Image: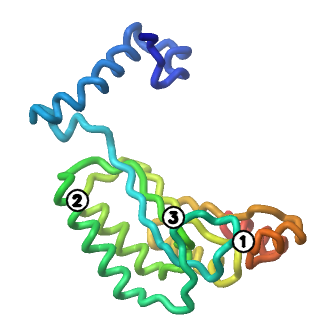
Amino acid sequence: MPVIPLHPERAESGAPAGHEQSLQRAAADLPQRMRAGTLQLRELPPLSLYVHLPWCLRKCPYCDFNSHVRDRIDQGRFAAALRRELAHEAARLGRRQLSSIFFGGGTPSLMEPATVAALIDDAARWFDPVPGMEITLEANPTSIEAGRFAGFREAGVNRVSVGVQSLDPDMLTFLGREHSAAQAVAALELAR
């Protein structure tokens, strides 16, 4: 069986000989140790948390994600349900390191910044965030969503993924996007 480096850049940068092979052996051993109950939580890799908001202002014709058009979202009820689910999963997984949080969708920038802040706070309470943890939120470049960027930053978001599929007006119409090219550029500037 050929050995495939887990991190080829480390092999080229002078990582200790056999380092990649020992990582592969440890990874291959995980399932057996989990079944035997000998695996310690501190040995598991850090978690990455994905939070899905399944709502959009408009369903794009090319979108294959779980997303639904809603003109009103009960933020309080939705936040309470997400927080309960996060607490449940944290209890099930145990205290683990957390390397990233990604708010995806749908259109997560339709969430209130307070909802995002509560989820980030809960994640930091239930898990151990790594220093400099990346917290990403997907957003569309409509003026409604771009106006919330400052609130998301205050909530703890340190990376925004702005959905700019094109700057060509005809292509934006074809794709069913709600924004213009000018709005897209303005949203990128605001996010920066």
Residue under label 1: 187
Residue type at numbered disc 3: Gly
Q: Position of residue 21 (x, y in %)?
A: 37, 14
Relative to 27, is 75 on the left or the right? right
In this rendered view, identify the residue nearer to me: 38 or 176.
176
Which callout, 3 or 1, points at the residue further toward the start of the chain? 3
Task: Look at the numbered disc 2 and give the secondary structure of its residue.
Answer: helix
Neighbour tally class for label 2: few under 14, some 14-19, many 20 plus, Cα within 10 Å: some
Query: Coloured how?
Result: rainbow
Residue at numbered disc 3: 104
- The CA distance from mark 2 to mark 3 is 20 Å
Which residue, given by chain and number where applicable, does mark 2 sit on?
Answer: 90
- The image position of residue 169, as x and y in percent, is 88, 71
**Which corner quadrant holds the N terminus?**
top left
Q: CA distance from mark 1 to mark 2?
A: 35 Å
Mark 3: give few (<14), some (14-19) or many (20+) Cα within 10 Å.
some
Name the spot of residue 18 as percent of width and height, x first: 38, 9
